[in-house]
Image: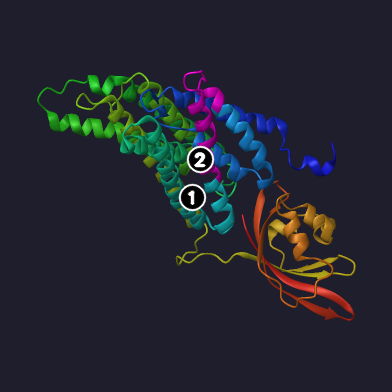
Amino acid sequence: MKPAAMSYIPNIPILGIWLLVYYLSGIISVQFDNPELHVALIWFPAGVATAAFLHYAMRHWPLLLLTFIIIDFSVSHPSSEHLIFNMVFAVVSLPSSLAIAWIIKRFSRPGDDINIIFYWFITTILVSLLDSLCFALVFAFETQKAFGQIFWAWFIADISGNFFSTTVIMGFLNNRLRPAPLAARHLLLGAIIWVCMVLYTTWAFSGNVNALNFGKATGLRDIVLFTSILLPVVLTAFMTLVCGNRGGALALLTLGSVMIFYADKGIGPLFLKRLHANEALLLVQVYLTATSLFLVFLRVITHNISHMTSDGQLRHQRQAIYQLNLTNGSLSWDNLPPPLAALPLATLNNRQRLIAQLHPGDQARLAKHWRTDAFVHKFPTIRFRLQDAQGDWLHVTDSGAVLIDDRGSLVIVGNWSLSS
């Protein structure tokens, strides 16, 4: 295979893990399938697909889209009775995830956590709303079923699956909100919190709270019920604060797994006697969605607090000034921040080697920015990802670059702003 073609095929073992996660999430979701509407009450693959499209470069999206469609068709248990519907569902269930990822990549500001989360939150709601509207119109017309019932079932399944799955997966993958290497005491404390959360959540959601007899003390029963629902969220938040976003993702995944296991059996503190089974499942969806969003904003807030000064102002971004000689491709630097200073000088001082240090999806952008036939005097601002000495990605903004003539040689002088 030609090297140029290889860039369109991602790492096969890693891709296999993504496909396995997508398949397993689909198998879990179809356990909550509504036989009348042919819609899963919660669709976890929506969030897995969104996370995958966000993680991979756009050149990998066609392959991801094709494999996800095949998996969607396989997990829906295709039969001759619903063959056409299953084929349509396999195709139309993915454009919303693709659109969400594209909008975030296209319009959000790299390195700005709050801006990225804002786009993710608003885009997920609006795109899912439009996707559900289109699906409900077509399906209601074909089956003569109630439009409102189909619309809300699809919309809630899409929203809850997107927020929960994306939060868990990006929590494991996102290096931007990752803390420094955890000390042994933090790991030990995190392990204790996780074990307590598993034990308590298993006890609370296995029907033990519902079985407690409070007699006529209805007020006490409501307090215990509320506490049993709230305490797992508190423990999950503690895991995030102690062990960072990956600890929080593990806690959220554990909480969701326990809830879903017992929800499949129709038991738990959210399955009240006066509620219909589907209404209780709706409460489970709302619970997981609200917990996911709470953890996302908790991560962002704690990450930004660590970047605040004592007087409450954001610390200045790390800045570096460079000079690039377009004749020989050599670079010189001033005011190098530690992440750049840790790179080998042979990489820092050579244009081609430095471009090779960038994320594969960003290399062409900087190469075009630093083109040798530049005839402009002021360059646009660009953003890209640079791999540091530890293998993590730094978000870099190249701004204020100008072209000057230095003793007969064309030189670009610019500024880099770094954020981890």
Does the magenta run of residues contain 288?
no
Residue name at image x 36 percent, y 35 percent: 150
Kind of residue sitting beneath label 1: Trp
Could you tell me what secondary structure mostly forms the magenta stretch?
A: helix
- Residue 68 position (above or below residue 342): above
Q: Which residues are magenta?
A: 73-98
Marks 1 and 2 in Cβ contact (< 8 Å): yes
Q: Picture coordinates of residue 297 (x, y %)?
A: 43, 49
Q: Picture coordinates of residue 389 (x, y %)?
A: 73, 50
Does the magenta run of residues contain 84?
yes
Judging depth in this view, the residue of 107 and 63 nearest the camera is 63
Residue name at image x 55 percent, y 35 percent: 91
* Distance from Cα at disc 1 to Cα at disc 2: 10 Å
Q: Element under label 2?
A: helix
The answer to whether residue 111 of the structure is visible from this angle is no
Residue beneath disc 2: 166
- Quadrant for the C terminus in the image: bottom right
Judging depth in this view, the residue of 317 and 5 nearest the camera is 5
Judging depth in this view, the residue of 37 and 18 nearest the camera is 37
Q: Picture coordinates of residue 350 (x, y %)?
A: 84, 60
Residue 30 shown left or right of residue 216 in the figure: right
- Residue 384 position (above or below residue 86): below
Residue name at image x 50 percent, y 37 percent: 46
- Residue 120 position (above or below residue 24): below
Residue beneath disc 1: 120
The answer to whether residue 410 of the structure is visible from this angle is yes
Q: Picture coordinates of residue 301 (x, y %)?
A: 45, 53
Q: Residue furthest left?
A: 216
Kind of residue sitting beneath label 2: Thr
Residue 116 shown left or right of residue 279 in the figure: right
